[in-house]
Amino acid sequence: MDLSTIWKKTQTQLEIRLEPSTYNRFFKYTELKKIDEGTAIIGTHSTFSSNILQTKHKKTISDLLSINYGKLLKVKFEVDPDMVDLATKDRSTLLVDELPIFQTNANPDLTAKLGYCNLNSKFTFDNFIVGDSNRLAHAAATSILNKKNRFNPFFIYGKTGLGKTHLVQAIGISFLEKDLSKKVLYVPSETFLNDLVRSIRTQTTLDFRKKYRELDLLIIDDIQLISKWVETQNEFFNTFNVLNLSDKQVILISDRPPEEIQNLEDRLKSRFQGGLSVSISEPELETRYAILLQKQKDLETNLRNEILRDIARIVTTNIRELEGALTKVNLMQSLKDSDLTSEEVASILGKEHSERKIANPNDVLRIIGAEYGVSLQELKSERRTANIAFARQIAMYIFAIELGFKLEKIAEILKRKDHTTVLHGRNKIETQMKMDAGLRSRIEKITNQVFYN
């Protein structure tokens, strides 16, 4: 295949994995310029785009490109004048957040409408794998569609990478398949904030309210982040009330249940709890295997079922890690003349997916202390200097999320009087990790030392 064909195939695979808004903004105007000494040079339309691809998507791009090229490749991003020209001509993509979401002359074609509503056509009910971990959430979603029940809001929560976005986008797609005139919108909470700030700055708040309050279905992702912005909470409260009174559907996605969202106004918390809250948990073995079968079909890979079983046994956390493991194993299989053995699959996935050793709490604290320059005694003390307090919050996060300790047990380990302090610390680190790649890298380093060294 020539470079253009290789990159188009890679772009197609990326489009399957990513939100439409992310793909259109950062991947649509890219081109594989050349491959030189094991490094693929990818042209982009802006320095900002290059930075985002480098910090957030480099590994995924490298893995997929390596598979399609047939050899392991590193990737490098640079601004390409041709891509700048293309992006400048298509200002609708660059300025999508500044435009009213619905217009009277909107294209009636379903595919075009999906993009207009920020919905990914790949996220359908047909390819959503149902198991014990998500059965209740799936049943509630289909119940809403069939109008057997109406839950407002439908609040779905769980850790990252478990299929929450897939499920709610499938609801949005089904809304449009039944009636293309429906007004559906999927946005992250930060987009809601940005739209609000822009409308205030440009004195177009009426346009903002028209955009959000005349919808038939509003889906907001990462709603827990709304707790950081007081004015945004107020605007969302009013938006929700208008939609609810108009018998319109609101769906919210979060990484935690409503009662655990800190700094959320009581009236909003009451609204969230007044609908239906359901969780999606980590998939069990058979569901993981079924997911891999579906992902193999989507990604056009051709591994034996026995290898998929091996991956499903080793990777127990979330769907994104399953997909990453599938990509990695498929790449190594493509470089071999014979089928991979179970031992080779385990070796390829390495420590990251091997069986974890049981961690002693004090050993965990010593590892964290070594990373941040504080002692075990200081972590358990009443001292609250910035570096000690931050390292202590890292410990709260790792104990809660990685080790699954109850909040009360963590409070006991760290000699805290109240488990709500632990909850606050855990939530603070979770929020910061979403915005700080360096912090995510340090916590991953600590976690690997905790479990595998």
Image (spheres, rainbow, N blue to C red):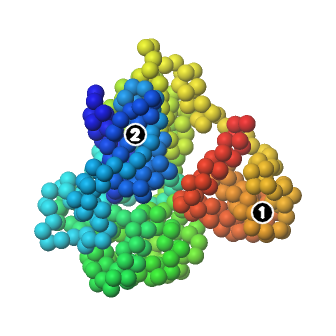
Q: Residue at x 14, y 72 (%)?
A: 104
Residue ID at (41%, 64%): 188
Left or right: 168, with 182 as reference point? right
Q: Which residue is mark 1?
A: 388
Along the horizontal axis of the image, is 196 left or right of 321? left
Residue located 72% across and 56% down the image? 395
x, y percentage for residue 88?
Answer: 26, 60
- Please identify the quadrant where the C terminus is shown: top right
Q: Position of residue 268 (x, y in %)?
A: 48, 78
Amino acid beneath label 2: Ile
Residue 376 against residue 36 in the figure, above or below: below
Label 2 crowd (10 A; few <14 / some 14-19 / many >=20): some
Q: Nearer the viewer, residue 299 or 26?
A: 26
Q: Residue furthest right?
A: 377
Residue 377 location, x and y as percent?
87, 58
Quadrant in which residue 420 is drawn: bottom right
Residue 265, compared with residue 431, is above or below; it is: below
State which tag comes first along the sequence, 1 or 2.
2
Q: Is residue 447 above or below residue 101?
A: above
Mark 1, Cα crowd under 10 Å, few <14 / some 14-19 / many 20+, is many
Residue 68 shows in this picture: yes
Disc sitting over residue 41 in the figure: 2
